[in-house]
Amino acid sequence: MAPEHSGALPRVVITGIGPVTPIGTGVAAFGASLREGRSGVAPIRSFDASDLKVRIAAEVSDFAPERYMSAKAAKRMARFSQFAVAASHLALADAGLDRAGLDPDRVGVVVNTGGGGVNTILEEQELAARRGVGRASALFVPTMAPNMAACQVSIELGLRGPVIASVAACASSVTAFIDGAHLIQRGEAELVLAGGAEASISPLGVSALANMHALSRRNDEPARASRPFDKDRDGFVIGEGAAVCVLETLAAARARDARIYAEVLGGGRCADAYHISAPDPEGEGAARAMARALQAAQRPPTAVDYVCAHGTGTVLNDAAETNAIKQVFGEHAYRLAVSSPKSLTGHLMGAAGAVSVTATALALERQFLPPTINLDTPDPDCDLDYVACRSREAAVRVAFANGFGFGGQNAVVALARVDG
């Protein structure tokens, strides 16, 4: 690690993680499922999907918002905001921090999303069709707005530092860690809650994505449906949930003897400028984002041990991402490990990047590689080490978490293990 010295930007580290995911809520449950390769994909339970082409999803099945907030507060939030508040509580607790001991003016929130309260919009539209728009809920606008997950975290926890909410499709919550680190390095905050939240599983959303041929149709074998990099992959599985991490300076973390999961070395962002939904087939944009992350991290390509891939399980994405990794890492691409947590969690859209960062932080701290489950038949076009089917112990020093979104938005964050 580069030494801290006068004039240098402060080093930013992750000291707490709060996952609310289809494979578990909290560090213990999420970490165990990640290591064991346990799928969170199942038949849809939140509505009747029997007439849909796709009837499977990765839902958060055991979520009770009243564990993390009052019933009154929960009623004033869309589900994605509830997830964000819960994840923030979990992250602070995991970091060993009591909000009463924090300076609220010096704590920032960066919680991003892809769809925000899209389900609230659909629900209110249905109600308006039945009873007239004149009886629209007074809470509709402040509930559905995409910035409300970040704002509700601020309100519920009494945090008065900068609050940022960005929408960058499926790259949204990778950017949260880049922006969160910048807030700390620029002196705008001493601590930041960074992550993403999403809850957009609905009949309309599932049907629209199915008609795009973006979703897997393995309705009869849901646990085997999400299969990134496999020759027989047929699309992603839509998921929901949130993940939030505590960011603070290395100096502050060491001063309070905090557990440190990983250091945020920096990130890279760019655009494909290619298509509204398809990636550049050569992976040129993804490669530029990874190259920029390497530059920001001030590391050579050979220093990277692991890439937590975007890895959605679509034919185009997985091949393009593989191409991008080869462009950036050259021959070293065949020596590093690549895997996709989406094989377990499904695709959490705007929250997917935060889940990837959380998984990568655990990989660095616990020295193991999360698996890509369901990779039974290797695709000749995807010929890297994807940690097929089972996790494994490994020395992981530097890792990337990738996030690529509709519209061609690309974001990559570089993380590193901190010893001592």
Image (cartoon, rainbow, N blue to C red):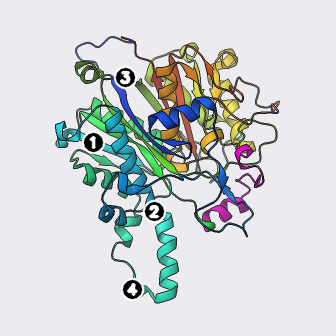
Three-letter residue code for mark 4: Arg
The residue labelled by disc 3 is 260
Determine contact: label 4, label 2, CB under 8 Å. Answer: no
Dot 4 crowding, Cα within 10 Å, few <14, some 14–19, many 20+: few
Three-letter residue code for mark 3: Ile
* Residue 214 painted magenta: yes
Disc sitting over residue 108 in the figure: 1
Q: Earlier in the sequence, mark 1 or mark 4?
A: 1
Disc sitting over residue 135 in the figure: 4
Q: Earlier in the sequence, mark 2 or mark 3?
A: 2
Q: Earlier in the sequence, mark 3 or mark 4?
A: 4
* Residue 50 painted magenta: no
Three-letter residue code for mark 1: Gly
The reply to whether residue 147 is in sight is no
**Relative to 352, is 16 above or below?**
above
Q: Describe residue 320's horizontal placement relative to residue 72 as left or right.
A: right
Q: Earlier in the sequence, mark 3 or mark 1?
A: 1
Q: Nearer the viewer, residue 168 or 90?
A: 90
